Image (cartoon, grey):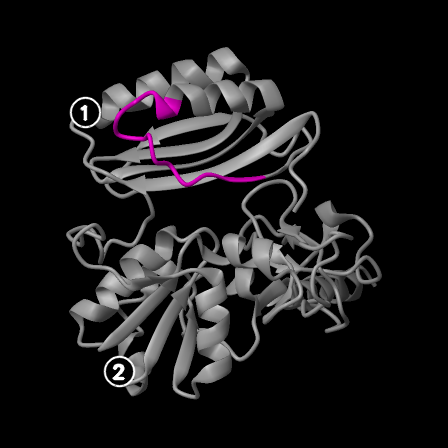
Amino acid sequence: MNSDGEFQVLLFYKYVPIADPTALMLSQKELCGRLGMTGRTIVASEGINATLEGSTDAVAEYVRVMRADSRFTDLDIKYSGGTGKLFPRLSVKVRKEIVSSYWGVNLDPKKMTGTYLEPEAFEQMRLSHDDVVVIDMRNDYEFLVGHFDGSVLPPMKNFRDLAQVLPALEQYKNKKVVPVCTGGIRCEKASAFLKQNGFKEVYQIHGGMVRYLEKFPYGMFKGKLYVFDGRNAIGYGKDGKGNGVVGRCGRCQQEAERYVNCANLACHDHFICCEQCEPDPDKAYCSHCAVESVAGLSMLSVSKI
């Protein structure tokens, strides 16, 4: 995806020992604040995870400062185009993990993780072997707008549920297993977790789906890539439209790629809704709440007669 322009988004993570997470959090907050950057950064004793947006000059200065730190000289940074309005604010927090899993708190991806595959090697492996199973480690709503053709989505609502659904993945223990995710961070722990639980051949794409799509925008990944900012989903390739449309409206099941949050605040489900079902994204109800809303209105109408 084109990253030229007035604003840029950068995405990176690194598993590296952080002796004083609070000190790094404070320095990150000062640096990003000074540069006028917005986005989210999580710091933990196991490393750092960040998605940030800023002007091209701010991003360049941020990267220069980060790489001057011996802990981050080799950061693998992914860039994409920004608008200057993709994040409402800057959030820098200290957490127990740089990606929430709970079951992976004691896993060290630096010591045990899946074998890295460059995008070209992953492409060749899938084309050359019948026993390759691609397992999507993202949240279920991310999968809906785009995913690898033929990939497996475990029956989990989000990444925290991986340990609970492990029995459903046991059938793949003796196959070549490739956990996949957006930028690679979840796959680091997921692949380590699978190896820890007896999976024999575990791989991961170096740089995640982002790196794959940079190389093969019209390859085996269909649809668009979900991202956690104001864009929601981005397409790769020259036209930025991605490789077809796989998303479906949660209300009418027609092709759609627009994400909204259910207007019922007690639900607030994140789902795809086409403009035909609801032109105003702030007034969209998920299929379940829409039925309840109509039923409630019907009862109200009867009571007034």
Residue that badge 1 annotates: 20
Quarter of the image for residue 228 reads top right
Q: From the top left corner, tell me how far across and down residue 105 is, in percent.
A: 19, 50
Position in image of residue 32 (x %, y %): 46, 19
> What kind of element bears circle 1?
loop
Q: Is residue 72 magenta?
A: yes
95, 202: nearer the viewer: 202
Answer above or below: position of 22 versus 284: above
The residue located at (30%, 22%) in the rendering is 69
* Numbered range of the magenta stretch: 66-79
Give the overall secondary structure of the magenta segment: loop
* Residue that lies at the very extreme toward the top in this rendered image: 34
- Quickly name the residue at label 2: 173
Whether residue 297 sits left or right of residue 216 in the image: it is right
Q: Earlier in the sequence, mark 1 or mark 2?
A: 1
Q: Which mark is residue 297?
A: none
